[in-house]
Image (cartoon, grey):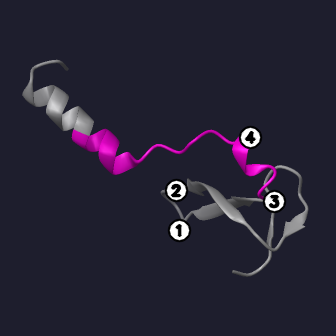
């Protein structure tokens, strides 16, 4: 993988870790990277497809 800039410490890293996918309605969005030492400081990203499936199950059970 190529060198990226850490989203937390703003230093270049040759071992970038993907910490966030930023979606946008007006453009393609972007990916945020962090160095291995800063990556644990970011919250774990939720899977949007898993959230949709959970909402569908809740609706089918009448919980929403």
- Mark 2 and mark 4 residues within 8 Å of each other at the beta carbon: no
Q: Nearer the viewer, residue 8 or 23?
A: 8
Q: Nearer the viewer, mark 3 or mark 2?
A: 3
**Quadrant of res 22:** bottom right
Label 1 belongs to which residue? 28
Label 2 belongs to which residue? 23
- Decide: few, some or many residues near mark 4? Use Cα within 10 Å; few <14, some 14-19, many ≥20: few
In the picture provided, is 24 more to the left or to the right than 19?
A: left
Report, in whole angstroms, how far the alpha carbon at label 3 lies from the one at label 1. Answer: 20 Å
Query: Magenta residues, as a range?
Result: 36-53
Q: Residue 25 location in percent, x, y? A: 48, 57
Could you tell me which residue is drawn at 8 percent across and 30 percent down?
60
Q: Earlier in the sequence, mark 2 or mark 1?
A: 2
Report, in whole angstroms, how far the alpha carbon at label 3 lies from the one at label 2. Answer: 19 Å
Q: Quadrant of the C terminus?
A: top left
The secondary element bearing badge 3 is classed as: loop
Disc number placed over residue 6 in the picture, else none: 3
Q: Residue 24 location in percent, x, y? A: 52, 56
51 in magenta: yes
Placement of 50 over or under 64, stated as above or below: below
Q: Quadrant of the N terminus?
A: bottom right
Could you tell me which residue is drawn at 81 percent across and 59 percent down?
6
Q: Nearer the viewer, mark 3 or mark 4?
A: 4
- Decide: few, some or many residues near mark 1? Use Cα within 10 Å; few <14, some 14-19, many ≥20: few
28 in magenta: no
């Amino acid at each position: 993988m190529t060198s990226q800039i850490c989203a937390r410490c703003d230093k270049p890293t040759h071992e970038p870790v993907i910490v966030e996918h930023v979606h946008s309605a007006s453009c393609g969005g972007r990916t945020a990277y962090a160095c291995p030492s800063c990556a644990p400081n970011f919250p774990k990203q939720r899977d949007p497809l898993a959230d949709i499936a959970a909402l569908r199950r809740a609706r089918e059970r009448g919980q929403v």
